[in-house]
Image (spheres, helix red, strand yellow):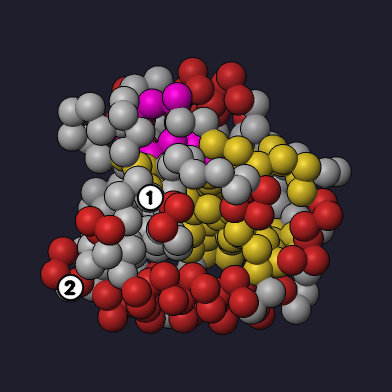
């Protein structure tokens, strides 16, 4: 089962940059999208259900902002929109689908922003999503995918020293990521890939992506008990169309 996660930084923009060609080529079982910046009523039928996929949407109330979506070949057993906290759910940040063996949680973590203006909101979100995943884990396995907006360790970004006080690499954010992983969850990519220079986000500034000056802020994390079911994890940094690249998790049937 191939699970793909991608922050598309605007789904309509991604469609104009070849999203559908990529989608048809991948033939993934599930595609989780973040920062879609669109509501269902703004899309046509083919965009809503390409190639017969089922699709589920949790958009932000604010137009052109945030939002997550899931395309699934197989109809899930259940779908949960949000986590039951209005400050989070109004921004369209969490969408969960249930399959036979696991819950798949598609998540777009807040950005702490310049001057750390939303750090308190970010940490509140982090606390709530951890509680949410721990509750799900009592029922069955959990895969938490998406844009966490956190580079956990120095290996996860090109220039850690220059970014020590920048959003996404703040001590408080990194500490939460460590706490999350200490609660029985696993960063699947880092568990299997130990070498540096693997990133999932690059600035749009000219030459930055070509020189691979990036950050790894997109993840598939699982509960540790599910680890023996993981077949493969990887990124595709050559896929363009967003400032993020898609990330992949293959689960044994």
> Closer to the camera, 76 or 141?
141
At 65% from the left edge and 63% from the top edge, which residue is drawn? 186
Residue 117 image position (x, y, % from top left): 17, 73
- Residue 145, visible in the rendered structure: yes
At 34% from the left edge and 74% from the top edge, which residue is drawn? 171
Q: Which residue is mark 1?
A: 157
Asked whether residue 241 is drawn in magenta, I would say: yes
At 78% from the left edge and 42% from the top edge, which residue is drawn? 231
Occupied quadrant, residue 80: bottom right
Mark nearer the viewer, 1 or 2:
1
> Closer to the camera, 77 or 185?
185
Asked whether residue 40 is drawn in magenta, I would say: no
Compared across the picture, whether 201 is left or right of 233 comes to: left
Q: CA distance from mark 1 to mark 2?
A: 22 Å
The local secondary structure at tag 1 comes to loop
At 65% from the left edge and 42% from the top edge, which residue is drawn? 233
Number of the label disc, if any, that sits on residue 117: 2
The local secondary structure at tag 2 comes to loop
């Amino acid at each position: 089962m191939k699970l793909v996660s991608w922050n598309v930084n605007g789904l309509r923009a991604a469609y104009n940059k070849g999203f559908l060609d990529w989608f048809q080529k991948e033939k993934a079982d599930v595609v989780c999208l973040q920062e879609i910046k669109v509501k269902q009523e703004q899309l046509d039928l083919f965009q809503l259900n390409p190639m017969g996929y089922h699709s589920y949407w949790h958009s932000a109330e604010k137009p052109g902002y945030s939002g997550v979506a899931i395309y699934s070949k197989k109809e899930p057993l259940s779908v949960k929109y949000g986590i039951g906290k209005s400050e989070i759910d109004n921004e369209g940040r969490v969408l969960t689908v249930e399959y036979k063996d696991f819950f798949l949680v598609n998540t777009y973590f807040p950005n702490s922003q310049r001057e750390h203006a939303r750090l308190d909101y970010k940490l509140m979100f982090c606390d709530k999503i951890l509680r949410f995943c721990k509750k799900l884990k009592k029922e069955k396995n959990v895969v938490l995918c998406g844009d966490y907006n956190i580079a956990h360790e120095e290996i996860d970004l090109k220039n850690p020293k220059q970014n020590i006080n920048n959003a996404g690499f703040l001590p408080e954010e990194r500490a939460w990521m460590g706490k999350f992983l200490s609660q029985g969850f696993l960063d699947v990519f880092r568990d299997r890939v130990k070498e540096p220079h693997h990133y999932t986000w690059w600035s749009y500034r000219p030459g930055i992506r070509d020189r691979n000056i990036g950050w790894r802020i997109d993840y598939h994390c699982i509960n540790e008990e599910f680890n023996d079911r993981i077949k493969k994890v990887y990124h595709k940094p050559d896929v363009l169309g967003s400032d993020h690249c898609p990330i992949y998790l293959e689960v044994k049937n």
